[in-house]
Image (cartoon, coloured by chain):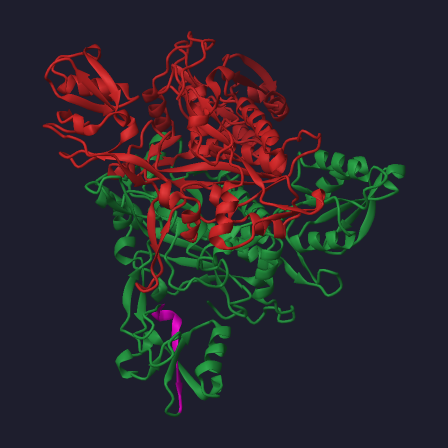
Chain colours: A green, B red
Amino acid sequence: MQTAPQTTDQDQPAVDMKDIVALCKRRGFIFGASDIYGGINGFWDYGPLGTELKNNLRDYWWKSMVTTPPIGPDGHPVQIVGLDSAIIQNPQVWVASGHVGGFSDPMVDCRETKKRYRADHLVILIPSDDTPWIATIEDDEDFLKARLKKVGRGKSLNDFTSKNLTEIDLAEYPKILAPDAKEKGTLTEPKEFNLLFETGIGASEADKTTAYLRGETAQGIFINFKNVVDSSRVKIPFGIAQVGKAFRNEVNPRNFIFRSREFEQMEMEWFCHPDEAQKWFSFWKDERKKFWESIGLTSDNILMRDHDADELVFYSQGTCDIEYKYPFTSPDFGELEGIANRGNYDLTQHQEHSKTKLEYLDPERNNEKYIPHVIEPAAGLTRGVLALLCEAYTPDPNRPSGVYLNFDPKMAPKKAAILPLTAKDGQPEIAEKLYLELREEFAVDLDIKQNIGKRYARQDEIGTPYCFTIDQQTSEDGMVTSRERNTMAQERVPLDKVADFLREKLK
Amino acid sequence: MQTAPQTTDQDQPAVDMKDIVALCKRRGFIFGASDIYGGINGFWDYGPLGTELKNNLRDYWWKSMVTTPPIGPDGHPVQIVGLDSAIIQNPQVWVASGHVGGFSDPMVDCRETKKRYRADHLVILIPSDDTPWIATIEDDEDFLKARLKKVGRGKSLNDFTSKNLTEIDLAEYPKILAPDAKEKGTLTEPKEFNLLFETGIGASEADKTTAYLRGETAQGIFINFKNVVDSSRVKIPFGIAQVGKAFRNEVNPRNFIFRSREFEQMEMEWFCHPDEAQKWFSFWKDERKKFWESIGLTSDNILMRDHDADELVFYSQGTCDIEYKYPFTSPDFGELEGIANRGNYDLTQHQEHSKTKLEYLDPERNNEKYIPHVIEPAAGLTRGVLALLCEAYTPDPNRPSGVYLNFDPKMAPKKAAILPLTAKDGQPEIAEKLYLELREEFAVDLDIKQNIGKRYARQDEIGTPYCFTIDQQTSEDGMVTSRERNTMAQERVPLDKVADFLREKLK
């Protein structure tokens, strides 16, 4: 996370994450997984509207990558093909990628509760007197305040100095009180904890092998590089794109769907000649920023953050995060997408471990043989959904719902709602006829009964750009009332022109 | 599997599954997962074209269920909403559903090789003389013949009588030779083997819980029934639809993607009043048959098979399988979709285990309170892809490729290919301009270089309905040559009318 640029607009009303989470449950966007069983930490289910929103983002990304990829620096469209690889692969894949050895976080255990914490997420609050040092979770202000209230003996945050746990020698802090401990709860030295979920494959005990749920979709692309080159008419430079679930056994899943244990990614691996890697790195940075802006994220809420040299993993030749100002990071930013120049690290690793040649013979360069370099724009699909929800959430005391979701129409789960005012005058029949016409082209909602104010409130809260109301007059003059979501402005539209109206407005 | 009706056309050329698998790899539909690492049994990766084909089927199912659901028996459109639940849920979900206790197959172990087999997939071949009894895998004729050749001592199939392993007492067969055994390899008594993949969640050993990868997508719907009713404007009868991955630790994954360990389902749970369950069961049987026929599966290759009373699980009030005549089952049929009248079994189980009321208060029935009954059309997305590939595979000695894929245009990964004949006369520029126009509306392929015969062969083998060739004349008369996949018939079409032409032909 990074401090906001000074130009950021400080006047917009602060939005509380709790309100967004509550709306998501109330209106059927996102539920805690296994809700009726008391839930399961770090897993989420997408309800009817959340699923449509997520599908809209997924399909728009796919269109921007695979169906209509951008025009490259030479003026010609670039080439990208799709892929959908298995979640479970031969375990050697994750040895080669480094995930089995190194995909881990430094963890400390509480000696009292036996609970485990990410060392780099903990701070120690050190008081000036003899009370214990309190370990607590960084960035979670609510937690921090609640903790202080419980064990801080009347002290406020100002009475403490704080140190990050990774910067101290724990042996020097014997009076520590771990985040969930009651009595002493000192912490062990940090050790590495692997994030891959394990499972066992095979029926017979003799054959049973340990395998892993993929920690990212990217490796499924690297191991298919040769298959794609051999079977498809692609030439360097080209990309392979994939959308799919990934799994990480996070220690502290938190911030709604931001850090969950099961999530979805949209990753594209762009294979190019080593000499052109830096050019394509710049190209994809620009393209990806444009993508998020084109679906409604405002530039004030987006930060392009180039990693400093000391942040880069050893093989990376450059990484830029696209960060979003989520309510729980504001005024700072949190990751939404990472764009990395990975060199030829991944293909080299898989070539070595699989003993399969992954070199490319380039007919455009006098049959030069080389291992391509890779530019990877890796976006979070579920984080994208979160950013869209946060961006759209607009408190508005001037309407009954008190809030509306200001989705870009491309992303809105429903493009229009059809609302007959009463069950009289053939209104439901007219409504159903209009619904059957519109649904062939647009995702539309037909909502027959209920107080019209409540129905408008629902459509505001789910972000439907247009409502069309059928009333007593409709059967007489063949007109319906259109209501625009953001302005609540109403106008009369001929029944047989509603599709044209919508097509024009949503363009 | 079931014997084919006598009416089935026996004249069509037999298709060998091996050829379909080879084409899938050669052209980039489906690869063995972790190919470069020697693979992993039971897992598959979908290449560029397989992904597009699978997405087309997924999206068409979603449209048929969620966006434009069918007109019900009362003449009004039915209501179905979407859902996307997590693969990993609270483990209690799978206890309640019966999967932890009962989702299992009867297994026997070989005492020599320690390998494990599904008892109901094994037969014993009993010779008339003193040679050992040979256990082998039913339905796999190649395996059976190879086995006989290896250990049958010159005997043919006719020299044996066969018995299904589940019908005999293994203690009476001490001379058995298990499928992969060399010396004796007698088999243990059958015992149950659970098909759920296990994993462990949580960072700390104290907190770590066993969880399961879902064995079906259906349970994610049942546990969200209450969330959906509370958050969405749905009234009984209504449906909840979901597409997603499921996992089963199959003992003998086989027949390409037919029986794999990771696969995709398209399931819809239809909630209705108990009195109406039988009516809706019939309704969905009809609708689902129409669905598969509408995307090109011919009725000769589809069998609607109602389960006999003794085949039904105890809570089922009726099940009908939609079976397809795959090359490896032909002339018999194998499962593609199951439509089940599940009564109120699932919601009752979850109500009991979660202690959460899952009754529905029906305003249309004087506020009658009841647990809805469920009709479940549960289709295999990946099995659907397999059926589409098998149906489309058409050997044709009259064309260079020797085969073409006769996809319904709705399902074809590419709707058209644009092929400039040479790099001269501005042909590549004209081709690119046409590509940029068409790709906004259709999935199109731009293939610039190579012998035109080879390029046609590729498009035939990937099932592209139309090719448009740009030649020397195009720059003079503004016409391109259209070539239709099945007939190979060619006609000249004006460049600026290609989009209209395609729109008309694909309608």
Where does the image place residue A202, in percent across and percent down from the top left?
Answer: 26, 40
Where does the image place residue A264, in percent across and percent down from the top left?
Answer: 45, 50
- When asked about the image quadrant of residue A171, the answer is bottom left
A110 on left or right of B145: right
Q: Is residue B2 visible?
A: yes
Q: Quadrant of the N terminus of chain B?
A: top left
Q: Nearer the viewer, residue B210 or B389?
A: B210
Where does the image place residue B439, in percent across and percent down from the top left?
Answer: 55, 33
Vertical arrangement, residue A178 with respect to residue A244, above or below = below
Residue at the image position 70 percent from the left and 51 percent from the top: A459
B144 on left or right of B47: left
Q: Nearer the viewer, residue B284 or B349?
A: B349
* Total numbered badges shown on the rendered structure: 0
Based on the picture, tell me whether residue A22 belongs to the magenta stretch.
no
Q: Quadrant of the C terminus of chain B?
A: top right
Q: Nearer the viewer, residue A364 or A490?
A: A490
Where does the image place residue B138, in percent across and percent down from the top left?
Answer: 28, 23
Vertical arrangement, residue B433 with respect to residue B231, above or below = above
Residue at the image position 51 percent from the left and 17 percent from the top: B299
- When asked about the image quadrant of residue B154, the answer is top left
The part of the chain drawn in magenta is: A117-128
Residue at the image position 13 percent from the left and 34 percent from the top: B112
Based on the picture, tell me whether residue A124 belongs to the magenta stretch.
yes
Vertical arrangement, residue B9 with respect to residue B301, above or below = above
